[in-house]
Amino acid sequence: MARCSIISTWSGPDRRRAERRSLLIDAGAQFNGYACDITRTYAAHDGAFATLVEAVDSAQQSLCGEVRPGIDYCEFQMRAHSALAQVLRDADVIATPAAEAVESGLSRVFFPHGIGHLLGLQVHDVGGFMRDATGARIEPPATQPFLRLTRKLEPGFAVTVEPGIYFIDSLLQAARANGHAALASTGSASMSCGLTAAFAWKTMSS
């Protein structure tokens, strides 16, 4: 039997909005002994935001189709960056080609977390860094310190696949200050800043 709970994470002074533009569901569920977090974003109207949500959902489903035993999740993280960088380029959020966005670190501005983790009795289950039975660790790459799973997948593993695009003012400002010209161009700057101000969204599929 599945169990699901939804707890509001809103910490602002007033939950009321003059206009509803999106719905974010951040839920927890249990099924057959496994615990999982499930996050979904829905757009209230057609437009740039709805198109971006749909593109991220499509990227997630494509990545899910690649999951199989033997995959190195550190390498899988980079495939997720490539997929999301292409989404950003197609949406004219960035002006640089997807491959360059990944290579330069620009994609990490919009996707600043790991692609997924092990599931088990805990939502973030133990063993994601375990090299062998002695407890030795496989450390995450220096450029991807937030990974929770650095192992190659084995039969029987249950994992999450969580690509996401975020517009976080502090990360955008730091990227511009560090010379990411692709963010400073007229088109990309107006797109990212305008959508951040208008929607203040988080887009993540898990």
Image: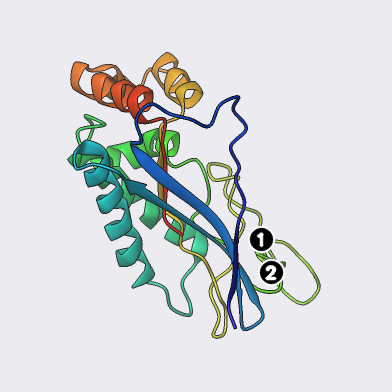
State the SS at label 2: loop
Q: How many marks are shown on the rendered structure?
A: 2
Identified by mark 2, the residue type is: Arg
Q: Tag 2: Cα neighbours inside 10 Å, few (<14), some, or many (≥20)? A: some
Quadrant showing the N terminus: bottom right
State the SS at label 1: loop
In 3D space, how far apart are the residues under numbered discs 1 and 2 (Cα atoms)? Answer: 6 Å
Residue 7 seen in the figure: yes
Identified by mark 1, the residue type is: Ile
Q: Position of residue 159 (x, y in %)?
A: 54, 70
Judging depth in this view, the residue of 202 and 136 nearest the camera is 202
Whether residues under marks 1 and 2 lie with C-beta atoms below 8 angstroms apart, the answer is yes
Q: Please indicate whether residue 58 sits to the left or right of residue 110 in the image.
A: left
Judging depth in this view, the residue of 191 and 73 nearest the camera is 191
Q: At x 58% / y 52%, what residue is drawn?
A: 147
Q: How is the image coloured?
A: rainbow
Q: At x 49% / y 67%, what residue is drawn?
A: 72
Q: Please indicate whether residue 147 sits to the left or right of residue 163 in the image.
A: right
Q: Residue at label 1? A: 138
Q: Position of residue 148 (x, y in %)?
A: 62, 56
Q: At x 53% / y 75%, what residue is drawn?
A: 153
Q: Residue at label 2? A: 131
Q: Position of residue 164 (x, y in %)?
A: 41, 48
In which quadrant of the rendered view does residue 90 lie? top left
Q: Position of residue 37 (x, y in %)?
A: 57, 61
Q: Please indicate whether residue 144 sits to the left or right of residue 175 in the image.
A: right
